[in-house]
Amino acid sequence: MLNGTNHSALRGLLLLRRRRQITSSTNREVHKRWKSNVVGFVGLGNMGIPMAKNLLKNGYTVIGNDVSAKRMELFREESDGAANTADTLQEISSSTDTVVTMLPECAHVLAAYSALLESSKENQMFVDCSTISPETSIKVAEMAQRKGCRFLGAPVSGGVVGAANGTLTFMVGGQEDTVKAAQGLFDSMGSRTVHCGAQGTGLIAKICNNMILGMTTVAVAEAMNLGIKLGLDPKLFASIINTSTGKCWSSEVNNPVPGATDNKCPSNSDYQNGFKSVLLLKDMRLGKSLAISSGAPIPLTDKTVDTYEQLTAKGLGDKDFSVVYKYFRET
Ligand code: NAD
């Protein structure tokens, strides 16, 4: 829940609603000149590894870290020896000028920054791309500020495909000069950077976007399950939706029905390597918490939270969230 101080800070942020797209042609060079090009990358999961590989491709030296030794090994393997890893966050912090974090939830981000900031340097830059609550991000920004460091909350949209292709959208909250200084990093991992305003505003945009994502995925799974039960061919039905008014990202790019599209989407590979259902549930709960504190009605989000709570209780939490189709099919 929001405490009093952060709640009023958030309300202020919402009122500001400053949205600006930043464009720059030579941002990578600017960032590299501003500081050294050594970047620490913490959280080598489904998103972290492809994002860190794009930093390598763009000439950065990357030192990765993950609590899982297997993920660090995979990162070294996939980067053909170009990547380094460090076992501790203190090493990451002390040997870099810039650190990117891509972690699952608020608790992981808070724990990681407590350790990272122990050995931070004045003016060091930290960019957190995890989807966490705006109030946690504001708290971490204050921790960083107390150590004389720069911090941006910069969640992303685009999924693992966007991470691999370097086409993520960054929704950034924080000081404008820091956003400019980090632009080279963003350009190396994404195709669009939007400075939403003060700390926490990028996360408000991200969480509200993911509420839509969760709801549209449940909607497509629900309707396709019914149509298929009534005899429609999955591929034919998907092609109709995708030229009709039901078309959305969840029907076109990440269709939840195996074989309904020829895409390389998780439903075509047993719902592996995508956006875990537990993480979507986390985002829906973050949206619910923001809605409760601001008094906005969220009837569809409530239903979606219920659905993902039931689905994860059935052991499907680590599967891509489009597994909701399989859940409906087998229920
Ligand atoms: P993931 O579970 O695949 O990866 C998270 C990684 O963080 C894991 O490898 C885990 O071992 C590591 N980790 C956990 N705690 C750590 C710590 N204290 N120090 C170092 N490493 C630690 O998750 P993901 O899909 O990569 O998502 C990461 C974040 O990005 C989440 O907040 C998620 O909501 C968000 N996100 C995911 C997607 C997607 O499509 N997967 C898209 C946009 C945003």
Image (cartoon, rainbow, N blue to C red):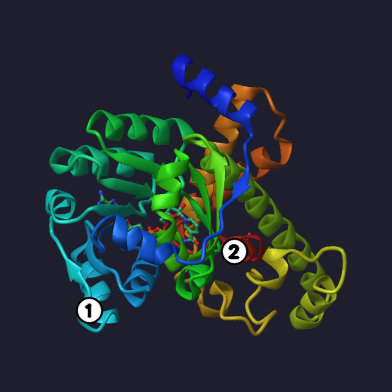
Residue 309 in the image: x percent, y percent? 53, 45
Q: Amino acid at mark 1?
A: Ala
Give SS at disc 1: loop
Identify the residue shown where x is 81% and y is 69%. Answer: 227
Residue 146 in the image: x percent, y percent? 25, 28
Residue 26 in the image: x percent, y percent? 45, 66
Looking at the image, which is closer to me, 148 or 74? 148
Q: Amino acid at mark 2?
A: Ser
> Which comes before the other along the chain, label 2 or label 1?
1
Looking at the image, which is closer to me, 63 or 259? 63
Give the number of the disc on residue 158. none
Which picture quadrant has residue 255? bottom right
Looking at the image, which is closer to me, 268 or 242? 242
Identify the residue shown where x is 58% and y is 23%. Answer: 11
Vertical placement of residue 22 versus 263, above or below: above
Disc 2 target residue = 322
Identify the residue shown where x is 24% and y is 84%. Answer: 80
Give SS at disc 2: helix
Vertical placement of residue 13 versus 302, above or below: above
Q: Residue furthest top?
A: 4
Residue 27 in the image: x percent, y percent? 44, 62
> Which quadrant is the C terminus positioned in?
bottom right
- Residue 153 seen in the current view: no
Does residue 183 appear to the left or right of 281 in the view shown? Answer: left
Which picture quadrant has residue 81? bottom left
Give the number of the disc on residue 82. 1
Does residue 108 appear to the left or right of 296 in the view shown? Answer: left
